[in-house]
Amino acid sequence: MSVILQSLDKQEFTVSMEVAQQSMLLKDMIAAREDAESPIVLKFVLGSVLAKVIEYCEHHQNDSLDENNALARSYDISSWDYQFLKADNVMLALMTNASKILRIERLRDLCAVVIGNLVCGKTDEEISTLFNMRINLPGEIRELVDNGKTWTDFRVQDQPSLE
């Protein structure tokens, strides 16, 4: 059985139920909907971003829930995930936002770790340049970024570093 997802820019993606249900939001929407044939419209995500999120979910569709939770907590990133998350920084930020709204916890957590590693020790201006947006971090968040302690136990399996 499959489901059709429609992005903000009206791109449609047909995905298996296993892929769709990695998203807790989609799982709830599928269970609650009356018309199983019509597309699920996702007005908050562009097609290019949804395609990347679907690619991630397809790759991880056979992972057990326990395996997903353990990996997310350990901050170990597989070689495949490492290559996947090497997207441009704007796409990385958009995938983080989409995975947060779609409630795909492991993808959200992995994106957050990579973003944390990218911004650690950077000024607001450098962060703005990285993500092509204006950043003005509040003092308490700036302190976390400056000291880097939140992201120090990050490591990548089979990869020397993210740089």
Image: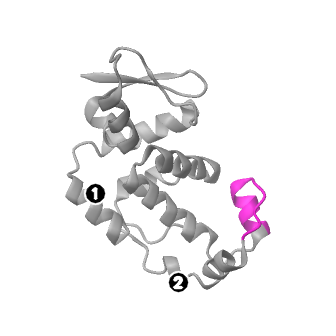
The amino acid at mark 1 is Asn
Name the residue located 40 percent from the left edge and 67 percent from the top edge. 159
Name the residue located 52 percent from the left edge and 45 percent from the top edge. 98
| Magenta residues (range) | 125-137
Q: What element carries label 1?
A: helix
Q: Earlier in the sequence, mark 2 or mark 1?
A: 1
The amino acid at mark 2 is Lys
Find disc 1 in the rendering and name its residue: 68
- Badge 1, how many Cα within 10 Å: few under 14, some, many 20+? some
Find disc 2 in the rendering and name its residue: 149
Name the residue located 77 percent from the left edge and 67 percent from the top edge. 136
Residue 38 in the magenta stretch? The answer is no
| Residue 34 x %, y % | 34, 19
| Residue 10 x %, y % | 57, 21
The foreground one among 42 and 146 is 42
Query: Residue 99, can we see it?
Result: yes
Q: In which quarter of the image is residue 102?
A: top left
> Distance of mark 2 from mark 1, alpha carbons?
24 Å
Name the residue located 32 percent from the left edge and 43 percent from the top edge. 22
| Residue 161 x %, y % | 48, 71
The vertical placement of 31 against 11, above or below, is below
